[in-house]
Amino acid sequence: MPVRIRLQRHGKKGKPFYWIVAADSRAKRDGKFLEKLGIYNPNTDPATVELDVDRSVQWMQNGAEPTNTARHLLSSKGAMLKLHLVKGVAKGALTEEQVEERFQAWLSEKEKSNQSKIDEINKASDEQRAKALEAEKEVSEKRAAEIAAANAPEPVEEEAAEEEAAVEASSEEAPAEETAVEEAPAEEAATEETPAEEASDEEPKDAPAE
């Protein structure tokens, strides 16, 4: 019975996730399987892959062939590397202790690499969030300035009111000045008439009789 290691689809429409299974190659893609070996969730960032490495290696030793996608996932978790190391043990080139030591060293390096990628993703996300907050702050400040400008009194109206007040004040002072100008000639006229009267009073009382 030919066995394939492949993906079996689960989840809802638009957000699928997959089981990594060993199944009869003649079975339907989402039908019966022989053993569940792990899961693959592409909806997370980075994608989540969980795998039983030892069981996957055993299936491949027994002739199971992974699909292209499954092979990529198995390689990302070290299953293909461990299969290669186990073949070295069968040939007498390595011991089981050396296989485990090399595999653990590879896992350690892989973990550091994954953590570095996660840190980069988090940093980019933080920067994007900071930019979004800064943009929202600018919009809020602009909106507040527009509201303040709309509620503030217009300086043109104040200047117009001051000009009207000045015109009214000048119009009230003008009649008083004209009255003062009109009274001045009357006083001059009275002054001119005074010498005549004085002259009549100074006529000689002892005028010769005709």
Image: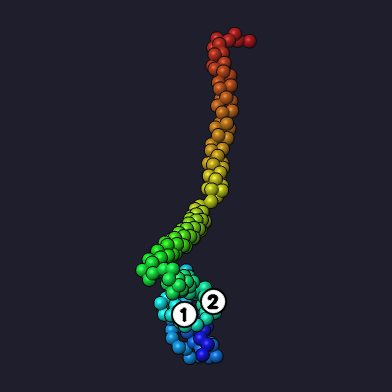
* Residue density around tag 1, few if under 14, some if 14–19, many if 20 or more, within 10 Å: few
Q: Position of residue 140 (x, y in %)?
A: 48, 58
Q: Nearer the viewer, residue 18 or 106?
A: 106
Q: Amino acid at mark 1?
A: Gln
Q: Determine the residue positioned at 52% across, 81% down.
A: 65
Say if 154 sits above or below 97 in the image. above
Q: Position of residue 67 (x, y in %)?
A: 54, 79
Q: Nearer the viewer, residue 64 or 207?
A: 64
Between the residue at mark 1 and the residue at mark 2, the CA separation in whole angstroms equals 19 Å
Q: Amino acid at mark 2?
A: Thr
Reading the image, the residue beneath label 2 is: 69
Q: Determine the residue positioned at 45% across, 88% down.
A: 34
Q: Nearer the viewer, residue 200 or 175?
A: 175
Q: Is residue 95 left or right of residue 72?
A: left
The answer to whether the residue labelled 1 contacts the one labelled 2, judged by CB atoms less than 8 Å apart, is no
Quadrant (top left, top right, bottom left, bottom right) of the C terminus: top right
Q: Quadrant of residue 28?
A: bottom right
* Residue density around tag 2, few if under 14, some if 14–19, many if 20 or more, within 10 Å: few
Reading the image, the residue beneath label 1 is: 61
